[in-house]
Amino acid sequence: MKYAFIKSDLGSYPVVVCCDVLSVSRSGYYAWRKDKPNHYALANERLDAKIMELYNAHEHRAGSPRLTRELNALGYPCSENRVARRMKALGIRALAKRKFKVTTDSEHNKPIYENVLNRDFSTTTINQKWAGDITYIPTVEGWLYLAVVIDLHSRAVIGWSMDKRMKAELVCNALEMALYRRNYPKNVIMHTDRGSQYCSNKYRELIETAQLTGSMSRKGNCWDNAISESFFHSLKVELVHQKKYLTRLEAKQSLFQYIEGYYNRKRLHSAIQYQTPFAFECAA
């Protein structure tokens, strides 16, 4: 019955999907049919199986560009167009994007830094330019705030902090983590938006004590801090929008796993030749 159903539904679904759903082997199906698929069909079957394996391993976050790089690295020669076609045939796609929303509170009279970075995101090594930002994570228990520090060279998240309050300590703790993990480098350009936390006395004192160069975006211009915004966009699309956190603790554990377990170590990044941030740093 299962084999007959697969045969009758071949026009709608690939064999690999039908066999997987019905828990039968492809070899058993072809033996039942008493015929063999042609070479191209077999190649597609093997590719489909690997695409599904990688797609599930990335928890549906990866699209055809990233999957193609991984497939090629694993010895599956294929083009991005072919992977896109196979993904369409399999009925899968990367998680959908949502519209960007500005959340920065820049309506204050506190002192600000000049825009030293000036949208020049180019680097030659780590610890030349860092970027920081804050985002909001919804939970049933209430908001959880996440602050990060990103190295613009590798796109690695090198500092982060989470709290139920969006105070100066939030951004200072993230920066202190970055400084500790990078052995306190000097003269790094530390770029952020004009949020009140980044204009606080505590944050400015940390910038001066660590001998960093403070830099801030122009008012209301999110593109001046595009790298941080891009990270938060990926975080929301690939994780937060797929979850409903009951507690802040649950959200913290999930965010930690995404940042340290997935983003820094497993997620291929187009800006660094489709390598992971940590692998890119090790190869430099």
Image (cartoon, helix red, strand yellow):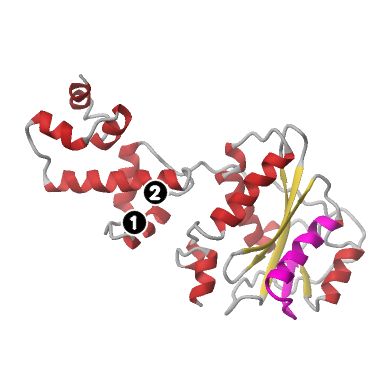
As rendered, which of 4 and 12 lies closer to the eye? 4
Residue that label 2 marks? 54
Q: Could you tell me how many numbered marks the image carries?
A: 2
* Residue 191 picture location, percent across and down: 73, 67
> Are circles 1 and 2 on residues that touch, CB within 8 Å?
yes
- Please, what secondary structure does the residue beneath circle 2 have? helix
In three-dimensional space, the C-alpha distance between marks 1 and 2, rounded to whole angstroms, equals: 9 Å
Amino acid type indicated by mark 1: Leu
As rendered, which of 152 and 110 lies closer to the eye? 152
Residue that lies at the very extreme toward the top in this rendered image: 1
In the picture, the disc for residue 171 is none
Residue at 60% over, 36% down: 243
Q: Is residue 112 above or below residue 89?
A: below
* Residue 53 picture location, percent across and down: 37, 45
Residue that label 1 marks? 71
- Please, what secondary structure does the residue beneath circle 1 have? helix
Magenta span contains residue 178? yes
Drawn side of residue 10 relative to residue 212, left or right? left
* Residue 192 picture location, percent across and down: 75, 63
**Residue 8 can be seen in this image:** yes
Range of residues picked out in magenta: 169-191
Q: Quadrant of the N terminus?
A: top left
Magenta span contains residue 266? no
